[in-house]
Image: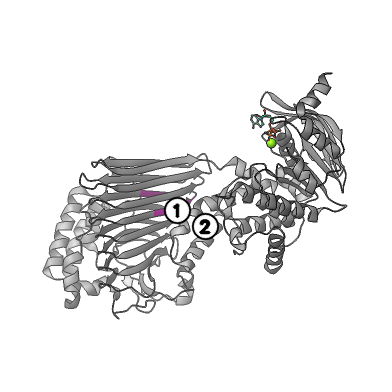
Amino acid sequence: MSLKDKLLSSYLTFQENADLDNSIHDIKDEAIKVFEEHGFPTRKDENWKYTSLNSLTKPDYSLVSHADDALEFKDVKKYFLNDIDTYKIVFIDGVYSSYLSETTHDGVDVCLLSSALIKPKFKQVIDVYFNKIAKKESLTALNTAFAKEGAYIYVPKSRAVNKPIQIVHFSTGNEANLMLQPRNLIVAEENAEVQVIERHQSLNSNAVFTNSVTEIYAGKHARVDYYKIQNDKENASLIDNTHIDQQESSEVSVHTFSFGGKLTRNNLNFYQNGEHNNSILKGVTIIEDKQHVDHNTLVHHKQPNCESHQDYKGIFDDKSTGVFNGKIVVDAIAQKINAYQSNNNILISDKASINSKPQLEIFADDVRCSHGCTIGQLDEDALFYMRSRGIGVKEGRALLMYAFANNVLESVKIPQLKARITNLIADKLGVNIGFDL
Amino acid sequence: MLEIKNLNAGIEDKDILKGIDLKVKAGEVHAIMGPNGSGKSTLSSVVAGKEEYEVTGGDILFENESILELDAEERAHKGIFLSFQYPVEIPGVSVTNFIKTAINETRKAKGLKDMPASDMLKMIREKSELLEIDRKFLSRSLNEGFSGGEKKRNEIFQMAMLEPKLAILDETDSGLDIDALRIVSNGVNKLRSKDNAVIVITHYQRLLEYIVPDFVHVLVDGKIVKSGGKELALELEEKGYDWVKAELTA
Ligand SMILES: Nc1ncnc2c1ncn2[C@@H]1O[C@H](COP(=O)(O)OP(=O)(O)OP(=O)(O)O)[C@@H](O)[C@H]1O
Ligand SMILES: [Mg+2]
């Protein structure tokens, strides 16, 4: 049985077991129909030309895990950011772990989607936002149909969450092949502020296929910073579908750090629904072996006087492959838009490859839009400069790559996270950076 | 310390250096002057080990051993330092991180352990004070957005940190204002000792008032056509290169 058929036939049992109110049931019924009609995307779809899900949909996945979720904190501590105080929402094989988590309802809600979907006190928010931002495409619909767990973050008007929130999804590998479909909803009301760090982490080499959906709503003047750490093991694959609704004068940034995993696809969609929005999309990809990372971004400028900044950098070694497909749409009424996009890549090995494609659909005339993509080797003059100061070729190259990638981190607002990512990059590239002033 | 013998070098089909002979002993300061395009920077790059240039004849000895087969970093480890005419910008690497890496790589090549962070910091403090460099400056990306003068001062800061045996300063004075010229020259002079040697490449006599050379050489069209004491620089300033060229053809 194909994965699609398996999912379709499991759907009914799934629904019967879920204690949800009618409106959610309806949403899910509608979603499974979308998935039934479109199935998994294939390379015939323009948007999936360079990423094939063929091998990913082959295994016989368990859709739930039968694990007893005992993980010791000390064994997974390294996957958390520990040098700052944070809220934590932690899942083990898709199941919430209260033991590893630290949630709150004090002024803001940092908790679980499963309880938000059923408890009356959240109903109003769920009715307004759940599945309202997400695009109705096949993979998001698949998630909508099955989703029952994930992070729920609600920040009321003029509130700021007092510390960053870490969302961590562990998979234990208790099942030979596991499919996970986490669902996050993040709502920052007018003038609210929140920072989120998300990570998917498998704990052994069994296959995991995660199809994740995150909806983010940023109200007027709200500020949301979202950081994705994609540094998973070699048999873990992730399709991340993130949908963002921005209202007037809001600022939302999404940083995606892709260093691990087998196949990673990021569908990152920004919808600018108010004036004076600022959208920031940044990414660093450093991969090797046969890893594959695909960034598919959309910034839809629907209102005037907005900005968007995209800066993605990639370093590809061995037979790794990358894709960057950055689409910018500017509606006719969206005048005075400043849309910036750049995608720079370094191929270390001649077997590595990157497909980089900007897609601009601009219907307004007063628009400043710049885009550029480079695929290159390292700067030889810079390398000679370093060598003449005693830095060997290997270290010199590593340092140059480190510098190339590290530049993207300037906009990371959490210093401890920045340090962590800097170290990950240095580690990945074999650079020894001892201390900094 | 350095002995260049009948050095011929070029790039692709173009001959740039056409038989250079130069001997620099420890403790000496040599100045090389010469018109634009005569090969001064090429000479310094070839000594530093830039592979882009092909050596087609002759030899370069450093402490009595040929270094032609050595990589640029190996020459640096031996104590050869080149202050670039056009220092390269390296966005994303701070001055501190860069110099720290350079020092520790050099130590590693010599079989030494990394310099302890506290020693490194102390040395950075000392040398940046010597060159009157603001500490904030050191955390900026190497050369990125530095003014011309800042780049040159930073080159000499690195030199002071690396303490080379032979320093080649390629137009380090260009872009420096009057005060900076004095500070930078002072930095260079601090490094001078009976064990070290300096080659300064310059177009202007002014620098040589601060860093007083023992010898002045004139490079024209890939050859050293005239050598003399420090008075030669004054004479050149007065009469221009046509004078030397005229003497040649005469
Ligand atoms: N990489 C290169 N490719 C092609 N030509 C080169 C290269 N490097 C040097 N040359 C040529 O060799 C000659 C010598 O150049 P060089 O930079 O050594 O001169 P210079 O004496 O340092 O001049 P300046 O006083 O202007 O700095 C010039 O004609 C230059 O164009
Ligand atoms: Mg020159």
Dominant secondary structure (helix, strand or loop) of the stretch shown in magenta: strand
Q: Position of residue A21 (x, y in %)?
A: 13, 71
Residue A352, percent across and down?
Answer: 48, 42
Position above or below: A217 against B176: below
Q: Residue at x 30, y 49 (%)?
A: A298
Q: Is residue A222 visible?
A: yes
Q: Is residue B154 above or below residue B134?
A: above
In the figure, is residue A424 to the left or right of A47? Answer: right
Name the residue beneath numbered marker 1.
A284
Q: Is residue A411 left or right of residue B222?
A: left
In this view of the protein, which residue sits in the foreground, A242 or A338? A338
Q: Secondary structure at mark 1?
A: strand
From the image, which quarter does the C terminus of chain A lie in? bottom right
Q: Amino acid at mark 2?
A: Ile
Residue under the image location 61 percent in, 41 percent down: A381
Please tell me in which quadrant of the rendered image residue B115 appears. Answer: bottom right
Q: Residues within 10 Å of mark 1 (few under 14, many from 20)?
A: many
Magenta residues span: A282-295
Residue A4 or residue A432, whichever sits in front: A432
Of residues A48 and B175, the one nearer the viewer is B175
Disc 2 under 8 Å from ligand 1? The reply is no
- How would you rate the neighbour count of disc 2 (Cα within 10 Å): few for under 14, some for 14-19, many for 20 or more? many
Based on the picture, tell me whether residue A289 belongs to the magenta stretch.
yes
The label on residue A102 is none
Residue at image mark 2: A425
Disc 2 vs disc 1: Cβ atoms closer than 8 Å?
yes
